[in-house]
Image (cartoon, rainbow, N blue to C red):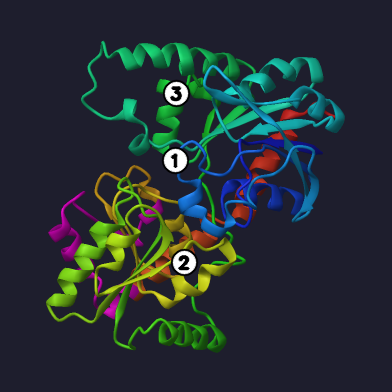
């Protein structure tokens, strides 16, 4: 079976769906072709340079690229802006040359799935889409919006109606969480009966808890190298250092505990506008952006994973490494912390302090951490999630 995957960008060296899904589909026998544009990751937020630092040049795939990566083929096409949205240059010809049985857009709306919808009947492939936009990052999904809000009218024209056309030509739309499904149905025009909730996953080959003496020795070495004491409890955050993500709130909470005499450190891995603010806390260890393969040793050197505001798939990686998770009480994807995490009141530093205090006892951390590692392996591994998609792809094709 030939599968073409469409995405704006290719986040080289990362652990996103754009890296993991094609890798595992190819591992299970599919002939996978990943088609991307010459755009840097996070181009829409303007965070590419500050988040990716030294990697910002290498994550742009040049037009004309045809390259083997992890068992699949990476294709680069030029991009162009149409009505303020990015689209491919030459997608129809590229798909005609590949002749896929299935095209899987990693987007539910936008030019890539819209063009694929137009091409699906002419070229004879089955179209699948996906939505990973959560309510927490989509303003129109926030409560309290007036029913006559002009933004809702604009959304009807720019997202909902094009999205409904896409949906009519789609076999299935994969939503990463329940609220991703709700956003897709209410705002992106996806037909309810075509939505299937399949979570984003974890590369469990890479992310796993301490399970050998070698892992334990590596944990001790990493902590010693970072100046972390044996008794220190380490709260880990990975991701962008932005106001929206607000890792500074975690730094404030850790600082309060430190000043109360608790042996505690905050380990921050990433980059962004809050970097200098984070470095101003005496209990904070601030490291730069890292590629996916570098992160497991730091999770395993930590004790608690904390994401103060927006949820992140990094939570899954940390949980797979055996860390209990702390998130805010507005989290929609509650399945990510079912039995392996606790919540605090959004934006309230004292509430966050109290949540971390609940996890200072090693036995409590071990109980939640073991549950999380087991759940990630059983329900969130990319291997299993890729098999589910592959079964859907095969079922959509005519009998041969």
The image quarter in which residue 248 lies: bottom left
Secondary element type, mark 3? helix
| Few, some or many residues within 10 Å of mark 2 (<14, 14–19, 20+) | many
Identify the image quadrant of the C terminus. Answer: top right
Name the residue rendered at 61%, 41% in the picture: 9
**For mark 1, what is the residue?**
177
Name the residue rendered at 27%, 60% in the picture: 277
**For mark 2, what is the residue?**
373
Q: Is residue 56 left or right of residue 101?
A: left
Q: Which mark is residue 185?
A: 3
Secondary element type, mark 1? loop
Residue 185: image location, x then y, percent: 44, 23
Among the two numbered marks 1 and 2 on one chain, the one whose residue lies closer to the N terminus: 1
Relative to 148, residue 72 above or below: below
Is-magenta flag for residue 60? no
Residue 128: image location, x then y, percent: 64, 30
> Do labels 1 and 2 touch, CB within 8 Å?
no
Secondary element type, mark 2? helix
Relative to 397, residue 382 above or below: below
User: Is residue 91 visible in this depiction of the protein?
Assistant: yes
Name the residue rendered at 59%, 60% in the picture: 203
> How far apart are labels 1 and 2 at the CA level?
19 Å
Residue 25: image location, x then y, percent: 72, 48
Relative to 210, residue 60 above or below: above
Identify the image quadrant of the N terminus. Answer: top right
- Which stretch is magenta? 336-365
Q: Which mark is residue 165?
A: none
């Amino acid at each position: 079976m030939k599968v073409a995957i469409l995405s704006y960008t290719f986040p080289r060296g990362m652990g996103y769906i754009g890296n993991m899904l094609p890798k595992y589909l190819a591992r299970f026998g599919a002939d996978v072709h990943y088609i991307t544009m010459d755009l840097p990751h996070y181009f829409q937020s303007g965070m590419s340079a500050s988040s990716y630092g030294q990697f910002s040049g290498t994550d742009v795939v040049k037009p004309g690229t045809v390259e083997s990566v992890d068992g699949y083929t990476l294709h680069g096409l030029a991009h162009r802006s149409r009505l303020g949205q990015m689209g491919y240059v030459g997608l129809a010809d590229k798909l005609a040359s590949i002749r896929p049985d299935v095209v899987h857009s990693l987007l539910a709306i936008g030019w890539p799935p819209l063009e694929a919808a137009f091409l699906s009947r002419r070229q004879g492939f089955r179209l699948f889409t996906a939505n990973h936009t959560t309510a927490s990052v989509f303003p129109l999904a926030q409560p309290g919006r007036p029913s006559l809000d002009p933004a809702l009218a604009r959304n009807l024209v720019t997202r909902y109606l094009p999205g409904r056309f896409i949906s009519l030509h789609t076999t299935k739309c994969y939503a990463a969480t329940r609220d991703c499904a709700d956003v897709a149905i209410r705002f992106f025009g996806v037909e309810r009966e075509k939505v299937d909730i399949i979570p984003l996953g974890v590369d469990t080959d890479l992310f796993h808890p301490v399970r050998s003496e070698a892992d334990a020795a590596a944990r001790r070495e990493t902590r010693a190298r970072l100046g972390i004491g044996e008794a220190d409890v380490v709260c880990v955050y990975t991701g962008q250092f932005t106001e929206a993500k607000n890792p500074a709130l975690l730094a404030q909470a850790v600082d309060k505990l430190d000043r109360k005499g608790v042996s505690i450190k905050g380990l921050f891995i990433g980059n962004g506008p809050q970097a200098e603010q984070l470095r101003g806390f005496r209990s904070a260890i601030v490291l730069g952006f890292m590629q996916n393969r570098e992160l497991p040793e730091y999770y395993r050197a930590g004790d608690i994973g904390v994401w103060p505001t927006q949820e992140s798939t990094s939570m899954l990686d940390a949980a797979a490494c055996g860390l209990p998770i702390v998130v805010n009480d507005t989290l929609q994807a509650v399945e990510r912390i079912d039995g392996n995490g606790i919540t605090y009141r959004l934006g309230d530093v004292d509430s966050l302090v109290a949540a971390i205090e609940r996890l200072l006892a090693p036995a409590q951390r071990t109980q939640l951490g073991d549950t999380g590692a087991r759940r990630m392996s059983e329900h969130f591994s990319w291997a299993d999630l890729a098999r589910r998609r592959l079964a859907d792809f095969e079922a959509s094709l005519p009998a041969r």
